[in-house]
Amino acid sequence: MELSIAIFGLAAAACWGAGDFSGGVATKRSGVLIVAILSQIVGIILLASAALLFTESIPPTTDFLWGAAAGLAGGIGLLALYHALSMEKMGIVAPVTAVLSAIVPMTFGIVTEGLPTISQLTGFLFAFIGVWLISREENSPKIELEKLKLPLLAGLGFGLFMILIDQVESNGVFWPLVGARMATIPTFILVASYKKQTKIPGIKFLPLIALAGVLDTGGNVFYALAAKTGRMDIAAILTSMYPAITVLLAWILLKERLKNRQWIGVFAVMVAVVLIT
């Protein structure tokens, strides 16, 4: 079971980290809302297709409602994250979002399930340190509070998503996440219409937006599986390591050099995985 939660949790981190990389690049070239809408549409198509392909039983209405509530929370987090990425540097956005998105479900898990083991708590500490070292800006010892609003909102939204989607009682994974998309897509469209931000981006950006949708959906599925396999707080901590993937992708694909402190952060994250699992 510990191995399963590690595999699913790290797979979710990989998907979300790569999705943030793709979505962040797409958002800088297109509107935040339209990127979110198109990526969510890709997601609902994939999830509904997977539910039918694997003949997953349709869950009770309450599970759809939990999924919808989780979707709204995660949707707000996604909009805040994409908007923050389009305005601020990743070094400010990523660590704040990741740490808060882990703290919220971790606190809930400790209250409802009790403390994890000492080694797992130590792993949590290494995970926080690692994410911060990997993502923090070198020359930013002071962070303006104004710049923290959107990352904090994103982290809160993602943290609530993790808690709410874990309340689904059935064994299904895909249909509750379909319920999440059914709540977010109309909401995003209404907001985009109100703000008059419905312009479809150029065709050359659509593959990147679609990729962001695929990866975000994959992250949701793997997190749901991780939370069902073991403790929610452990699943949340493992998935909160996604900024490491984003930074490593920038290193590999954009040829951005990793500083010594970032390599130390990568090592800290690896230690965290061992301790947690």
Image (spheres, rainbow, N blue to C red):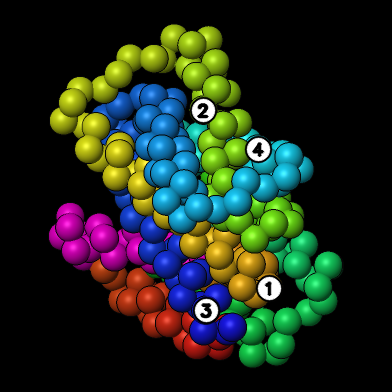
Residue 248: image x %, image y %? Answer: 29, 65
Can residue 152 be seen here? The reply is no
Which region of the structure is painted magenta? 239-257
Residue 250 within the magenta-colored segment of the rendering:
yes
Give the overall secondary structure of the magenta segment.
helix
Q: Secondary structure at mark 4?
A: helix
Comes first in the chain, label 1 or label 2: 2
Q: Secondary structure at mark 2?
A: helix
The answer to whether residue 97 is above or below residue 269 is above
- Measure the alpha-carbon separation of dots 1 and 3: 11 Å
Residue 145: image x %, image y %? Answer: 60, 42
- Measure the alpha-carbon separation of dots 1 and 4: 22 Å
Give the label on residue 231, or none: 1
Q: Residue at x 84, y 67 (%)?
A: 111
Residue under pointer 3? 4
Residue 21: image x %, image y %? Answer: 32, 50
Q: Are marks 2 and 3 in contact (CB under 8 Å)?
A: no
Q: Residue at x 73, y 57 (%)?
A: 169
- Measure the alpha-carbon separation of dots 4 and 3: 26 Å
**Amino acid under disc 3:** Ser
